[in-house]
Amino acid sequence: SLQPNAGSQGEYAGLLAIRAWQQARGQGQRDVCLIPSSAHGTNPASAQMVGMKVVVTKCDDNGNVDLADLKVKCEQHADKLACIMITYPSTHGVFETHVKEVCQLVHQHGGRVYLDGANMNAMVGVAAPGEFGGDVSHLNLHKTFCIPHGGGGPGVGPVCVVEDLVPYLPGHQTAGDARKIGAVSAAPLGNAAVLPISWMYVRMMGGAGLTHATEAAILSANYISKRLKDHYPTLYASANGHVAHECILDLRGLKDTSGVMAEDVAKRLADYGFHAPTLSFPVANTLMVEPTESETLEEIDRFVDAMIAIREEIRRVERSEWPQDDNPLKNAPHTADSLLTADWPHPYPREVGGALAGRLPGSVKYWPPVGRVDNVYGDRNLFCSCVPVEAFADEAVDAAA
């Protein structure tokens, strides 16, 4: 079904299909959804929205689903097990080594397998969910198949199902399709005007091109992980040391040695001209880097060099050359205005604050427009910055006059 307007809506539609299928079989009591701790963040919310109860299963030290714990949970909830939601490759940045066993175990206890398609850009042309046991999956067209993503959309998250679940896909009255679960968005084909972008992308890339894109995404993540291994260890990897399409850089040990947190590194990256990678998800005080297939080697090297330069700055804090509460990371990002003031009270030079040292001649310097903000204070003290209604009334009076 092309109807879902987002990956999260695809999850919702897929879970509704599973529930409707089980209810049609007289098994409406099945309402437990198993979700590994490595799953995508929207999974628990989607399960709750369709009336399922979420039960979290453990992961092992390498980031894979813990089969022993999964078996216990399956047996514990055997008569109420509706499904499991897994992300493959997982949000831990690894391909589940026992994914077939995971699917078989859930199937043996009467459940279905929902595969979150958020990371499908590491699977196209390489692996097929249906072949290792998936029953339902959505595709993030905004990530794997080229449609725009910035500004919140437009999103499209088609949901795919195996044969026996087809009758339970979303329907729509205006299309004369009164299926079991009804519509999940306003239009029968969802965001139809966007779909030709993905269609043209697939046609132009061809099978070989799509496979190459997947291989490039995986290669890029492994390249970053390997180049940074002496500076930031990768938290999860396979037995051979490889990651999937993303790598989680473990910054947790820096807190004890320097007082630096992952948030400080994220803000410091702005001085080097980079939007920060995913911060503190799925593991607190880490950075999850996902280069995808679209970054050039030159850009990836520029990012890696910036991360290494930041690590050298952290080492200077560790050597007590700069205090833990007054250094380029704790004060980042640095605006142009902050560097042009007559009084410079910090122990490091202005050119260090602006990340100007070592830049190539003629390279463009990005200047962050906003300096350091207190994220926690902002989250806890929300306020409206919009113009008050009274101002519009005054404008109307002035216009009339």
Image (tube, rainbow, N blue to C red):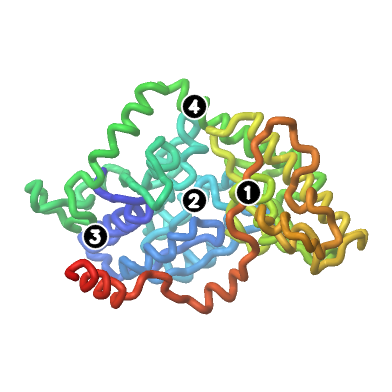
Mark 4 or 2 closer to N-term? 2
Residue type of the residue flagged with mark 1 = Trp
- Near-viewer residue (357 or 291): 357
CA separation, marks 1 and 2? 37 Å
Q: Position of residue 117 (x, y in %)?
A: 43, 46
Name the residue located 24 percent from the left edge and 39 percent from the top edge. 193
Residue designated by label 2: 87
CA separation, marks 2 and 3? 22 Å
Q: Which mark is residue 367?
A: 1
Which numbered mark, 3 or 4, is in the foreground of this view?
A: 4
Q: Position of residue 363 (x, y in %)?
A: 68, 33
Q: Which mark is residue 211?
A: 4
Tell me: residue 200, above or below residue 89. Answer: above
Residue type of the residue flagged with mark 3 = Ala
Q: Is 346 placed left or right of 213 in the picture?
A: right
Mark 1 or 3 closer to N-term? 3
Tell me: residue 257, above or below residue 249. Answer: below
Mark 1 or 2 closer to N-term? 2
Mark 4 or 1 closer to N-term? 4
Quadrant in the picture for residue 299: top right
Name the residue located 16 percent from the left edge and 51 percent from the top edge. 171
Which numbered mark, 4 or 1, is in the foreground of this view?
A: 1
Quadrant in the picture for residue 337: bottom right
